[in-house]
């Protein structure tokens, strides 16, 4: 269990939008069976989130390929599923903790319970996360040895 205030010295909740897409189109198999004619792939309908763009996000295009899909309905379903999965930016919580008895490098891959109560979380954040990354800072004069833990929802 990691508490703030307590062994958690600081935390950050950065948002990563590198995988976000508010416009999506998928490409399927070629529907042409005549090798002498020009061939074009089956394309899904273009999905665009106009509300997201109106809210100030730039248009972020996403694509996916399904080279074995030959039916329009199936390709549109794949495109919708991919688009839904990429709609929201990903948040990767980071916490800086003091290394000690219950906080060791062995936490990598483990699930931890994080409790934070401060001005940002007045009703207390109480959630479980999996530790997916770690960087350790050696002790300095007047500062203990600390680690930055990168977390994901299990």
Image: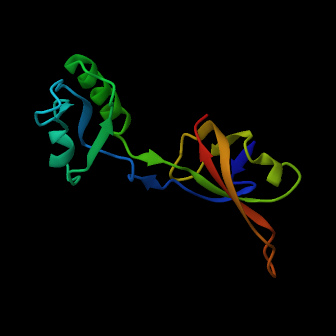
Image quadrant in which the C terminus is located:
top right
User: Seen from this angle, which residue lies furthest left?
Assistant: 37
Name the side, left or right, on which 97 lies relative to 65. Answer: right
In the rendered view, would you say 32 is above or below 6? above
The reply to whether residue 103 is visible in this rendering is no
Q: In the rendering, at what x and y percent does residue 129 appear?
A: 64, 39
In the rendered view, would you say 134 is above or below 153? below
Q: Residue at x 26, y 24 (%)?
A: 75
Q: How many marks?
A: 0
- On the image, which quarter does residue 34 sit in? top left
Q: Residue at x 19, y 38 (%)?
A: 49
Q: In the rendering, at what x and y percent does residue 125 appear?
A: 58, 41
User: Seen from this angle, which residue lies furthest bottom?
Assistant: 141
Image quadrant in which the N terminus is located:
top right
Q: Residue at x 66, y 53 (%)?
A: 133
Comparing 145 with 48, the one in front is: 48
Q: In the rendering, at what x and y percent does residue 135 appear?
A: 70, 62
Q: Residue at x 20, y 20 (%)?
A: 72
The reply to whether residue 101 is visible in this rendering is yes
Q: In the rendering, at what x and y percent does residue 65 appear?
A: 32, 36
User: Seen from this angle, which residue lies furthest front?
Assistant: 36
Name the side, left or right, on which 30 lies relative to 103. Answer: left
């Amino acid at each position: 269990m990691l508490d703030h205030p307590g062994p958690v010295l600081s935390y950050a909740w950065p948002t990563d939008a590198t995988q976000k897409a508010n416009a999506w189109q998928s490409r399927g198999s070629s529907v042409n069976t005549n090798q002498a004619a020009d061939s074009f792939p089956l394309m899904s309908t273009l999905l665009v989130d106009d509300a997201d763009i109106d809210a100030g996000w730039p248009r972020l295009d996403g694509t996916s390929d399904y080279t074995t899909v030959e039916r329009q309905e199936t390709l549109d379903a794949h495109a919708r599923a991919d688009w839904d999965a990429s709609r929201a930016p990903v948040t990767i919580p980071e916490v800086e903790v003091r290394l000690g008895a219950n906080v060791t490098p062995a936490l990598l891959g483990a699930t931890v319970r994080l409790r934070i109560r401060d001005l940002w979380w007045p009703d207390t954040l109480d959630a479980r996360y999996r530790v997916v990354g770690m960087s350790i800072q050696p002790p300095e004069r007047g500062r203990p040895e600390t680690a930055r833990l990168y977390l994901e929802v299990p």
